[in-house]
Image (spheres, helix red, strand yellow):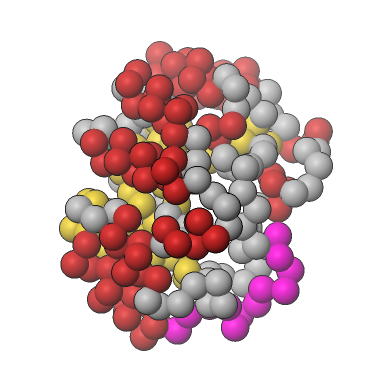
Amino acid sequence: MLIAGFEKNTLLDYPGKIASIIFTYGCNLRCGYCHNPELVVEPCKKALITPEATVLSYLKKRIGLIDALVITGGEPTLQPDLIPFIRKVKSLGLLVKLDTNGLLDDIVKEIVGLDIVDYWAMDIKYPQEYFKEYGIDTKAIKSTIDMIMGSGKDYEFRTTYVKGLHVIEDAKGIGEMIKGCKNYYIQNFRKGKTIDPSLNRSNSFAEEELEAIKQIISPYVDRVVIR
Ligand code: SF4
């Protein structure tokens, strides 16, 4: 595992749980609004790397104090030893949350089959037609959505809405992709360190626009929250 970020405690990343979180290096997308360019487009810095053994030994010492490990990135499913790593974490009795962009549906299939992830979080970046336009395999995305929804585990789908890249009406196409989903989060773009440095405050949606997005997507999902 190429772990390029390790936060020992977070109350924000696994709903209702105390978790540690790791950030894996490398991604198969290049979202302009990505807040983690050091994990995606910048060379992997040695100074950022935390050995897997350090993470596991920390978790072992905190058994009873920490409920879960959140694995995010980057795109964690790119790590060739992700599955053995998750097994090691599970053997400590911890819950595992895995964040993914859903492109590598084969890995997701294997993990769902092994029943080693307790909470899935998947970014639904765009409606289907955008993925096609960007040359991204929509079959894989749809297959991952279906597997997560059918896994019997907790899950959430979420979209970061970026004005200029998204329009309010995109919520309809996204809703159609995740129809019947339990939890959906609308995330507004926030200015900050991004892969595309030209993105700024004007790329954030106003409160009433986020509400309009919520109205459009509400009929498709059980619960929708503006985060
Ligand atoms: S936002 Fe996520 S999927 Fe997009 S480039 Fe960043 S880490 Fe990859």
Check the picture and name the quadrant holding the N terminus. Answer: top right
Q: Is residue 90 above or below residue 34?
A: above
Residue at image point 67% right, 37% down: 25
Q: Position of residue 16 (x, y in %)?
A: 31, 45
Q: Which residues are magenta?
A: 195-206
Residue at image point 35% right, 18% down: 114
Q: Is residue 149 above or below residue 217?
A: above
Name the foreground residue: 25 vs 109: 109
Left or right of 83: which side holds 45?
Answer: right
The secondary structure that most of the magenta stretch takes on is loop
Check the picture and name the quadrant holding the C terminus. Answer: bottom left
**The magenta stretch spans residue 203:** yes
Residue 5 visible in rendering: no
Q: Position of residue 161 (x, y in %)?
A: 47, 69
Left or right of 154: which side holds 31?
Answer: right
Name the foreground residue: 149 vs 73: 149
Q: Position of residue 137 (x, y in %)?
A: 50, 45
Q: Is residue 58 above or below residue 36?
A: above
- Name the quadrant containing residue 219: bottom left
Q: Position of residue 213 (x, y in %)?
A: 34, 75
**The magenta stretch spans residue 225:** no
Left or right of 169: which side holds 73?
Answer: right
Residue at image point 69% right, 44% down: 39
Residue at image point 50% right, 41% down: 103
